[in-house]
Image: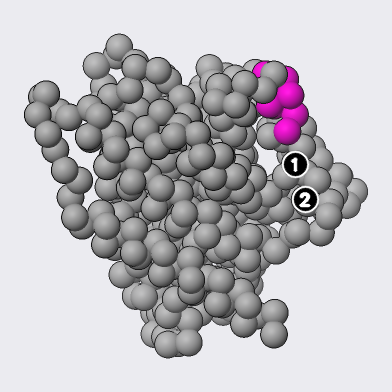
Amino acid sequence: MKFLKALAVFLGTIIGVGIFGLPFVAAKAGFFTVFVYFLIMAGIAIAMNIIYSEIVLGTKKLHRFPGYVQEYLGIRWKKLTFVVTAFGLIGALLAYLIVGGQFLFAYFGPLLGGDIILYTLFFFVLGAYLVFRGVKSISSVELILLGIILAILVLFFIKAFPFINLDNFKTFDPGYIFFPYGVVLFSLWGTSVIPEIKEMIDGSGFSLKKIIIVGIIMSVVIYLFFIYVVQGASAVVSNDAISGLEKSVGSNMIRLGFLFGVITCFTSFITLALTLKKVLWYDFGFNKNLSWFLTCFIPLGLFFMGLREFIEVISFTGAIALGIEGTILIFLYKEFLIKNPPGGGSKKINPLFYLLSGVFVLGIILEVFLFYAKLI
């Protein structure tokens, strides 16, 4: 049961709002373009999560990412890392608020009335409460909701399968060749929850590496499955992936899709919010309740400031924040190996990781260029 709960928390963190941006990205760039991205990025995500898990398991004190950076790279790097980590987690939490509120409104609005702001606030209040409660309540919720997610996905596939048109997968636009990068990276990144998983399985004998590999492979399968169903059955793929299916599968299935959206956004929101709370609490010495307040209310404030385009939010967050975090993680791992050589001997970092840091830097440059191009 501990293994399943830990796997559920890991999956619940990874499978979040990114899943709803993927069909739109695939419709623009091409299904097989996104498929290739997943093959490459899944390997990168597994490698990055595993090296971080080695750091977490090999360090006596339990930190969050900025704390490990301070221990091995120094206080200046910690300050930079805190900014990057906070930026990434807040961007993710903002995206979950945006889409979670939209789906909650789409599901309950026709029955109960009210506007989208009210439903976003309800989503926020329930999530903030569970974050305040802590990891034990969240781990149990994640396991239950993961089962519901998989059941809904299967039902969705059964209903939508007769409407799948293979011609929808023939699209390819070279102009969108780099479009999937930030969204795919965002949809597979799970490093933030690794210390949480370590706490959950500590002393149980389960392998953290196994949870990472199984979790990311399962995520990729679920993502590609979802893209196939949505892109194949939609005449026009909508930004939220679900709305565009109504003509094909009917209003009842659309409502089920909205429920699927609420659950997936909710599971990731509570897990990542807990992670940011503990970064502020453990690594920066903030009061526990103040850490909770800042974690939950900053994304809400950004939402009310008008930041509500979720695909742009996750693309920018994925390419910029996670790209910088990935680069820092590589140099962190290098220092970790120097100070904690396995078996008492010396070990150098694989040179391929330096090439990987170049990929992250290139992704950052491209995202900034594309963002600037949109502005002009």
What residue is rendered at 34% in x and 58% in y? 357
Marking on residue 298? 1
For the residues labelled 2 and 1, the Cα–Cα distance comes to 6 Å
Q: Position of residue 240 (x, y in %)?
A: 63, 63
Q: Quadrant of the N terminus?
A: top left
What residue is rendered at 31% in x and 31% in y? 55
Examine the structure image and report whether residue 289 is included in the region drawn in magenta: yes
Assess whether mark 1 and mark 2 are in contact (beta carbons under 8 angstroms): yes
Q: Nearer the viewer, residue 225 or 265?
A: 265
User: What is the residue that sits farthest to the right in this orientation?
Assistant: 114
SS assignment for the magenta stretch, majority: helix
Q: Position of residue 126 (x, y in %)?
A: 73, 31
What residue is rendered at 30% in x and 12% in y? 203
Look at the image and tell me whether residue 325 can be seen: yes
What amino acid is labelled 2 in the image? Leu
Q: Which of 80 and 198 is in front in this view?
A: 80
Q: In which quarter of the image is the C terminus?
A: bottom right
Task: Identify the secondary structure beneath mark 2.
Answer: helix
Which residue is under mark 2?
A: 302
10 Å crowding of disc 2: few (<14), some (14-19), many (20+): some
What amino acid is labelled 1 in the image? Ile
Q: Give the range drawn in magenta.
A: 288-294
Residue 206 left/right relative to 62: left
Task: Identify the secondary structure beneath mark 1.
Answer: helix
Examine the structure image and report whether residue 287 is included in the region drawn in magenta: no
Q: Position of residue 281 (x, y in %)?
A: 61, 23
What residue is rendered at 68% in x and 26% in y? 291
User: What is the residue that sits farthest to the top in this orientation?
Assistant: 203
